[in-house]
Amino acid sequence: MMIKTQVCSAAIAAMLAISMVGGAGANEAGCVTSYDASKDYFPDKVEVKHGAGFSITYSGNTKHIRNDVSGETYVLYQCGTPAPADVATKAGSLQVGNWTKVASVPPQKIALDSAPASAIIEMLGVQSTVAASYKFFTVTSPCMQKQLAELPRVAQSFARKRGLARRVSYDVADAGAEWTFTTYGMSDPQSFALNPDGARDMLGKAEWIKFAAAFFNKEAEANKIFADIESRYTAARDKLTSRAKKNVGFARYNKMANGTVVSWTIDQPQAWIVQGMADAGLSAYSGATTAFNNIDAFYAATADWDVLIDGSIEPLSHGGATIPLWQNLRDGYKFGDGAKKLPYVAANAIYRSDLISSPQNATDYNEHLQIQVDALLEDFAKLASDSGATDTTWYRNLPLQVQVDWRSPNDCKN
């Protein structure tokens, strides 16, 4: 099988391009030693133009970020200048959601519990700030795997509030880290959620590189990387949108640990998937999530699908789950002679987004795919144009038995 190199190559190319165009930008690379209340400390700024799900404003020595996905507000201030007073939600507060959190930027040491943040950190070239990760956090990036293996793992502290066990905080102090990038809002004043999966459109997803860059004063770099992604995306989209549409749907079989398949589900895709697939010449199913207890009813509901994207998991008898193979899908969907008339079966057009994975069950779907939407659009275009595409970056063809591209620290070349 062809080894997939586009993802890492694109990140490296972006960093090289930045070094050739204006260097690191005008924002401070570290703490300042004196404070001038009249100074604009962030001359390099980002602007959100698409349906990203966050907004950012600048004022003097502060940046105000509203994460509409997590429902949190982040106030960042230039390291070495006064911290904004009486802004942050108090640690230990019983407030549910709508927290305001404060941090100085740029940080010296952080912890990771966010796969898309890991990918962006590599693209921005600030891997040296990663000092720890959550103990169950996994990634597919070989070089990040190698780095994290040599760093401390942090746990989460829990407490009981009103009789319920509640996540309180990451134990970042144990690793000397200042805060954690995570993927959900939580009652931890030292955690910041990064949520490209909550964007409304494809380019909105890519704009989360601007969100992360604000924490490192890397706005100039983020603007350059995003502009390149946007340019490539729009150029490709303009060539693709005149295509006749193929129908694509999302489904899974639901299997118990003893191997019994109990039902089948058609899933509702996120808005950015529907929009991105439309740009590529695919008409994505966008109805409600629907469950079926009868396989014939499932076949009838998917009879006009040209492409099926599978989201099943294969449970293990001793607990946990693993990535399904083609034989698992044949059994799970009962793909016998009676299913051969289904367009997606006849065309060998059944895929999963786990082509790039790690042995620890991480997939690059949660990392680079979340940001590099120009490359993702290329994948969608191949699903739209080819019967049984096998040269995709993230989507694995199951009927043609394309093998998983397993990534390990040994694959780190940089």
Image (tube, rainbow, N blue to C red):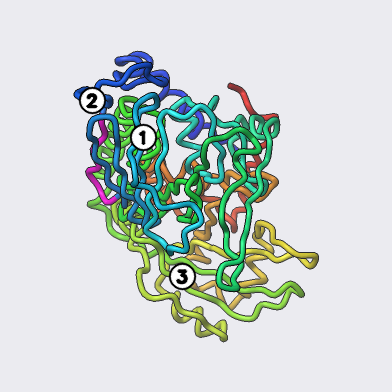
Q: Residue 255's mark?
A: none
Which residue is rendered at x = 42% and y = 28% of the image? 106
- In the rendered image, which quarter contains the N terminus? top right
Which residue is outermost to the front? Answer: 86
Earlier-in-chain disc, 3 versus 1? 1
Residue 210 falls in image quadrant: top left
Which residue is outermost to the right? Answer: 318
Q: Secondary structure at mark 1?
A: loop
State whether residue 331 is above or below residue 411. below
Residue 345 placement (x, y as % from top left)? 53, 66
Q: Is residue 58 left or right of residue 350?
A: left
Which residue has dot 1 on it?
A: 83
Which residue is rendered at x = 66% and y = 31% of the image? 146
Distance from the alpha carbon under mark 2 to that under mark 1: 12 Å
Few, some or many residues within 10 Å of mark 2 (<14, 14–19, 20+): few
State whether residue 384 is above or below residue 20. below
Q: Are marks 3 and 1 in contact (CB under 8 Å)?
A: no
Residue 194 placement (x, y as % from top left)? 43, 47
Residue 14 placement (x, y as % from top left)? 40, 25
Q: Secondary structure at mark 2?
A: loop
Q: Amino acid at mark 2?
A: Ala
Q: Secondary structure at mark 3?
A: loop
State whether residue 161 is above or below residue 219. below
Which residue has dot 3 on it?
A: 267
Q: Amino acid at mark 3?
A: Asp
Q: Is residue 397 visible?
A: yes
Q: Which residues are magenta?
A: 45-51
